[in-house]
Amino acid sequence: MDFVTLILNLDRKIIFGCVALLVVWPLLVPIQMPIGTTPEVRSIFSAIDALPNGSDVMIAADYDPSSKPELQPFTYSLLAHCFEKDHKVHILTLWPGGPALIQQAIEEVGAQYGKSSGTDYCFLGYKPGNAAVVGGLTNSITGTYPTDFYNRPTANMPIYQRVQRVKDCDYIVDIAAGATVEVWIAFASAPENVPMSAACTAVSAAGYYPYYQAGQLDGISGGMKGSAEYDVLLMDKYPNFKNGGARIAGNAVKGMDAQSAVHLFIVLSIILANICYFIANKRQREERRNA
Amino acid sequence: MGMGKRLLACMALLLLLPLHAYAVPAPADVELSDVANDEGNAVAISWDWDGSPTEADQFSVELRVNDQLLKHFELSQQEMQTLTDARNWLSGEVGTLLDQRSSAKAEMDQAQSDLDQSIIDKLPGSEVAGLRRTYWQKYRVFRRLDKQIAALQAKFAARTYKGEDLRLKALTWEFLNEAMRNGGEWISAAAMAPMASVGTKGARTDLFGVNAARRNDAGRLYFTVDSISVPNPGTAASDDSSTGLEQFASIPINLVPDIEYQLRMSTYGAAESNPMDPAAGGGPQLAEQISLGTVTPRGNAFDKSKTNNLVFALLFSMIILAFIILARRNPNMFIRRIAGLEAVDEAIGRATEMGKPVMYLTGLQSLSELSTLAAINILGRVAGKIADYESDLIVPNRDPVVQTVAQEVVKEGYATAGRPDAYREDNIFFLTDDQFSFTAATCGIMMRDKPAAIFLMGYYYAESLLLAETGAATGAIQIAGTDAEHQLPFFIVTCDYTLIGEELYAASAYLSREPMLLGSLKGQDIAKALMMAIILLQAILFIFNGEWKFFKDMVTPL
Amino acid sequence: MIFLKRQLPIIIAFVAGIMMWIRYYIPSEVSTNLEDGYLEWVRIIVGFAAILGILSLLQHHMLKIRMKRPGFAFSYVTIAAFALMMFAGFAPFNFPGFAEKNMETGSLFNWLYEFTFIPMQATMFSVLAFFIASAAFRAFRARSMEATLLLVAAIIMMVGRVPIGDLISNATPTFMMFGNEYHFIDFEEWTGWLLNVPNAAAKRGILLGVYLSQIAISIRIIFGIERTYMGGGD
């Protein structure tokens, strides 16, 4: 069997092996490529940054462990950014697998900034029924979530003396692994006129561009690259992230080398497969002509 | 004039001097109005601001309450009694617990610092373990007390709320009464807000000229007021510290429809050298108080800003219904061929030949999503055909409600095909509601049972490629149909046929060939043509810089 | 019986559908309360569905074990894992070695979640990377004009969305046009254009079609023309 037929009939386990190697290697030996930022992510960053200190930000972290590598770094960076600006954070999830991840993030980042639950932030927890929950929040946050994740009544919390509905929040960010962005746009952001951004998995990012162009989303962050860009912006503006806050920000940056390597591998393998495909085609044609 | 009074006057003068130095210009040409298209609990203020506002310029709005409003908040004798009883009950129940909790907290903190110290001092492991045990014990005691208190407060709320916001109402009423008695009858309606952010919050789209406030005019600011913020009288009277309810710092209450409010505005300015730091003698300084006039919020029966939505909804519904009626008269309508649906028979036939089952997935969303309903509708049609061919049908589900409905639908499909005996209920089962566990389980079934045909209908997320690629690896004929447009590329490369977007919704009509359903497809096409015309017109108008006010309002997104 | 199975559901669907539609246009308190009530119902029904799901799951696997169908041993694993997680979540005491009970941080349930469930989920998701590589390798061939376009776009996107794309772009020489400086190869610009122009245009077309279809299917359901979902054919 010659090279061309070998490539065209390559066992997929060999491709799997190459991918595995290319993911693991850069994680062990980081190259630290510089990361450029895109306008989509810059506009999320500047929107959060432009809010007056102490604004209310509603964060919907609608993902579960399966998309943790892509979206959890964004949650960390966004929380850090909000707390850096003393924003009040209302965080919740529409995904049953989400609470444990959010709890981890909010408790860790909250502790680093000395923020207390109920005053500076509230983790509302999980409620089933996407649109039903978001619709409920536009009427009353404490009515939809009578208790927070830790089972404390929300109506008593200082944070909810000022804010009652989604309308009272200054910004919404949906960190979504699924199709919840549309729900937030249709039931919260658009009718209540609260500006909104979305961070989603790289796969679904392309799907939200129509909303981005129509101005219904201020910005889009796609996958780990988006998170890495946000980290870079954060580190540029707030230098203390570079030193003390390394545990909070910069997780996505580490993953970018591996992603670069795998993308490059896939591109090269597609090109190789196509060259072989052409050679094989040409051979066939010649054979046919000879016969 | 005594010495003290003279001194006071001097201090007042001293205070006044900087005020004038930092005074911001008073609002001019103030317009008060009801906010259109709301529930009737908001009023709008718009005004000209002389000069450009900065973040250091601030203002607040206050309301004057009247007897009418007080009456609105008045409690009946019985309600008053309920409230007093409940509060007495709470303070009786919770008093000792609160003390216990604070001492438990102190003990816990002590235990924690002991533990921290022991770790820093590098004490032997057994000692550290002992301290850690003690800490966890103290922690649990504290948590238990904390939970008990929270539960009691929740009980109190349940006792007093009883369907309406009785406690809130009572506290507010007490406060308002107090305010009237003491002459401080102005009630803060908006906390101090910086000028720079005015008009961004809670503002609604101005459509069809329904918002009286002309906030689009240059230099004109717009603000809506929808609640009064009153300090908690419970804590002010300090009799709620015994109940642990003192967390209520202030209580916001919505404005009441059809009651006249008097408004006034306070403006503040700040020293330029030191604009926002009150500790250094800066911070906002009261400049002026201006009476704005009176206004009454009114509830609206129809939200006029949704007029365009209503027009389009009625228009499209009418077109679709009209075509459904037309289709009853003339059942032979032309519908273009959809390759994926033509292949359904082929796929099921192949499964029968090979003696292997057919797998059908309804997507990952719940039954309330329309794509799932569409998938269920197709399942009904496909089940009938499968019963005809005498193949097995496997339907794994992610949602228990969908599963129940799928069972019903398949059963009916088999019955209609005259093969109720071939129906096996446990072939339509629930797996798990977790996305990737569901995917793993379904892929497992694909690998073990090797179905000859796989239908992937409905809405899919990131698992689309996992499912479709596994299916491709088993060599099954795959027909996918989804409106999850970002998953379409994956289905297109891995499946034999893919229904794109609306084809999923058309499939049920296509398979059944029922005239009424086909009619709705036709109506939909006409509606789509109309939409295309509107987009084209708007694009042309935009290119030539034209504007047609009515048309622009019609197509403005909400 | 036929009334309960056929007419009544259609009447309910019609009344509820029309009511919720009209409600959307009315901003008054009554309509807000109506919506609140409706949303509460939805949440309650979703809650009950969980019980239905558990029953179906157990029934399916019990049957599999009883009939000794192929792979029935896995059903034991499923049931055991289900029972363990449930027990860990509801047991009113601390398991030895765990500081907390139920679902709190530091409990057995939480430990199981964090160290078995999360890694397993992440594993499933990351399988995607391998599958995409193999699917791309097999399926992306420049067979025709359209396929070639798809191929070129895919390559630009893949390189342009990672830092290496920036490195390549910055390494290429620049040229001046209309007073602006451009790189000969500029992946950021190209990916931006692909996402914002052809991608967004196609998505919009599909979305408009989908939403119109959703309106149509809603009308068919509200007016009882489409009844397949109720388990009744025609």
Image (cartoon, coloured by chain):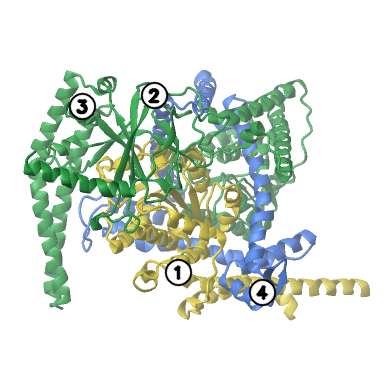
Chain colours: A yellow, B green, C blue
Residue labelled with disc 1: A236
Q: Would residue A68 be found to the left or right of residue B388 on screen?
A: left
Q: Nearer the viewer, mark 4 or mark 3?
A: 3
Query: Split into 4 quadrants, where in the image is the C terminus of chain C?
Result: top right
Badge 4 is on which residue?
A268
Mark 1 belongs to chain: A
Instruction: Name the residue rendered at 10%, 32% in the picture.
Output: B88
Residue placed most toward the observer, C229 or A29? A29
Image mark count: 4
Give the Cα distance between marks 1 and 4. 33 Å
Query: Label 3 marks which chain's residue?
Result: B
> Which numbered disc flags the more N-terminal residue, 3 or 2?
3
Instruction: Name which residue type carries label 4.
Output: Leu
Are discs 3 and 2 located on one and the same chain?
yes
Q: CA distance from mark 3 to mark 2?
A: 20 Å
Q: Position of residue C231 (x, y in %)?
A: 56, 31
Task: From the viewer's perspective, tell me whether residue B538 is left or right of residue B162.
Answer: right
Disc 1 from disc 2: Cα separation = 50 Å
Q: For the residue marked with disc 2, what is the amino acid? A: Thr
Residue that carries the numbered disc 2 in the rendered image: B296
Disc 2 element? loop
Callout 2 crowding tier (Cα within 10 Å): few <14, some 14–19, many ≥20? many
Q: Residue at x 54, y 76 (%)?
A: A22
Q: Nearer the viewer, mark 1 or mark 2?
A: 2
Q: Check chain identity for marks 4 and 3: say if they share one.
A: no
Question: Which residue sits at x=44%, y=48%?
Answer: A172
Whether B390 is drawn above or below C231: the answer is below
In the image, which is nearer the foreground, mark 4 or mark 2?
A: 2
Q: Which residue is mark 3?
A: B180
Q: Could you tell me which chain the residue with mark 2 belongs to?
A: B
Asked if residue A6 lies left or right of residue B49, the reply is right
- Which sits in the foreground, C104 or B222? B222
